[in-house]
Image (cartoon, rainbow, N blue to C red):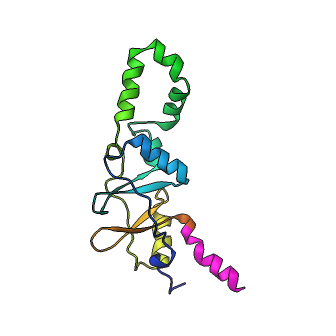
Amino acid sequence: MTDIFVKDVMVKEVVSVQPDTPLLKAAQIIMEHNFDGVPVVDKENKLVGILTEYNLIEKSSSIHLPTFQKILENLKVLKQDSAEFQKEVKEVSALKVKDVMNNDPLTLAPEASFEEMIKTFREHHRVNPIPVIDKDKKVIGVVSRFDVLKPLQLLNKKL
């Protein structure tokens, strides 16, 4: 597999968000697409961070989604009971991607070897996906652990 590169297995149609995207909208995008995360890009499609499920649920996050989900399920009852609750809901609703994203994501170049991609996933097991960027830091693709399996499918077809 020495002649396989990141560019051969990466997903080229990238779904991304911007730093000022409302956090709840970004979480919805991640859930709707069944992603583990999305690159965060500026208006020129340059990588500025990554937002992952882990960022949304980690203890130090500004929002803990399982707790927020429970709040939303009981919204009608709680709304009548507490002005404080309404204040908290407003604060959570006001959060942006930039408030919880990872500002220093791992990246790979399209020319990186398949072996380098596997090594990166092994060494950074919480990371998924990994943005693929060009020399100008523009996002040209993403690779996930699933993409590691693509060459194995090709081998299976040849057998």
Of the pair 111 and 58, the residue shown nearer to us: 111
Magenta span dominant secondary structure = helix
Q: Residue at x 46, y 54 (%)?
A: 37
Of the pair 44 and 155, the residue shown nearer to us: 44
Q: Position of residue 60 (x, y in %)?
A: 39, 39
Horizontal side, residue 58 vs residue 33: left or right: left
Q: Residue at x 35, y 52 (%)?
A: 102
Q: Residue at x 42, y 20 (%)?
A: 85
Image vertical order of residue 150 relative to residue 61, above or below = below
Q: Residue at x 41, y 27 (%)?
A: 89
Image vertical order of residue 133 relative to residue 30, above or below = below
Q: Position of residue 78 (x, y in %)?
A: 49, 18
**Quarter holding residue 46:** bottom left
Quadrant into which the N terminus falls: bottom right
Q: Position of residue 28 (x, y in %)?
A: 49, 45
Quadrant into which the C terminus falls: bottom right
Q: Residue furthest right?
A: 159
> Does the magenta portion include 152?
yes
Q: Position of residue 2 (x, y in %)?
A: 51, 86
Image vertical order of residue 104 relative to residue 3, above or below = above
Horizontal side, residue 132 vs residue 8: left or right: left
How many numbered marks does the figure carry? 0
Which segment did they paint magenta?
A: 147-159
Of the pair 64 and 59, the residue shown nearer to us: 64
Horizontal side, residue 138 vs residue 141: left or right: left
> Does the magenta portion include 5?
no
Image vertical order of residue 110 relative to residue 48, above or below = below
Q: Residue furthest top?
A: 81
